[in-house]
Amino acid sequence: MTFSAQDLVVRYGGSTRPALNGVSMTAPEGDLYAVLGPNGSGKSTLMRALLGLVVPERGSARVGPRDSRSWDRRALAREVGAVPQTETFAFPLTVRELVAMGRYPHLGPLRAEGREDRDAVAAAMERCDVGQLAERSVHTLSGGELQRVRIARALAQAPRALILDEPTASLDVRHEMTILGLMRGLAERGTTVLFITHHLNLAARYSGRMLLLDEGRVAAEGTPEQVLRAEVLETVYRWPVVVEADPTTGSPRVTPLDPA
Ligand code: ADP
């Protein structure tokens, strides 16, 4: 299941400048696809457009072959898991209850929760290493634990594509690497994983392709080597950088310099 946009323009009510201004991109099937760009460059708006949550002024956002807004919402929820940047929980749900919510799109008036659903919840908790937290209230979790639980909920959905907004922000190294490893494993097994991040070097190392946004426009799209070029990054981030091959990983490594 691909994510794609074609000449996508999105403008919020009252804004003169569009939040997205002619964006074309494709996150191929089974890729780990990073969306990069400065604050306010349109990353979250692209995520909303791909999920069919905003109405484009022009162009299209697609999930697979179909326009995101023409999907039946329940069908889309079976195909695409979404992990927004933050969410608050009004009720003291347990971890297991929250992860089980990922199964809702598969249930219905004629289909109550069954063995398949319980197995999917257990498998998702296992993969995100949150089984030991199953009976804990989500209110008592640390930031890293809660993030793993929210990803487990998306996996319980058994989606063919996943979209995550800064999934590793505020996580320590171990939890960050665990989540990136998990995302890479999903991509290797055929799930399309699109994620927004500010971590250029980790994105360079883990993603197959990446998109760099700048004030709602595509500054670069392609492999990490094609996108992470010093002259492009300096223009977009308005900061001097050096890009070299990381001797340990071989991926491009971006080092911001001291101001001139
Ligand atoms: P990013 O995720 O890259 O930080 P966003 O997609 O959140 O960027 O925002 C892109 C632009 O759209 C910014 O100029 C932001 O101020 C504006 N914007 C975002 N959400 C809204 C909204 N709900 N109403 C009006 N403007 C918005």
Image (tube, helix red, strand yellow):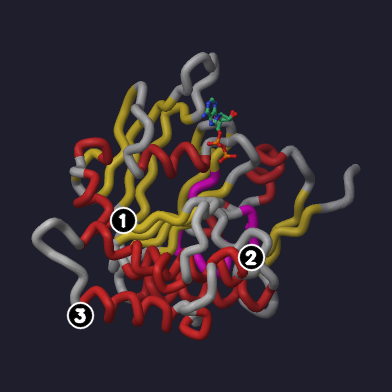
User: Is ligand 1 closer than 8 angstroms to the Cβ of mark 2?
Assistant: no
Q: Position of residue 13 (x, y in %)?
A: 47, 18
| Residue plotted at (54% across, 40% down) | 213
Q: CA distance from mark 1 to mark 3?
A: 22 Å
User: Is ligand 1 closer than 8 angstroms to the Cβ of mark 1?
Assistant: no
Magenta region, residue range: 198-212
Mark 2 and mark 3 in contact (Cβ < 8 Å)? no
In the picture, measured across the screen, residue 205 lies left or right of residue 235, that is left
Identify whether 173 is placed above or below 233. Answer: below
> Which one is in front, 41 or 243?
41
State the mark number for residue 80.
Answer: 1
Q: Identity of the amino acid at label 1? A: Val
Q: Position of residue 226 (x, y in %)?
A: 53, 54
Residue 61 is drawn in which quadrant? Answer: top left
> Which one is in front, 87 or 171?
87
| Dot 1 crowding, Cα within 10 Å, few <14, some 14–19, many 20+ | many
Whichever of labels 3 and 2 marks the residue nearer the N terminus, that label is 3
Query: Which tag is nearer the camera, tag 2 or tag 1?
Result: 2
Identify whether 152 is placed above or below 210. Answer: below
Q: Which residue bears the numbered disc 3?
A: 115
Look at the image and tell me in which quarter the C terminus lies. Answer: top right
> Which one is in front, 103 or 23?
103
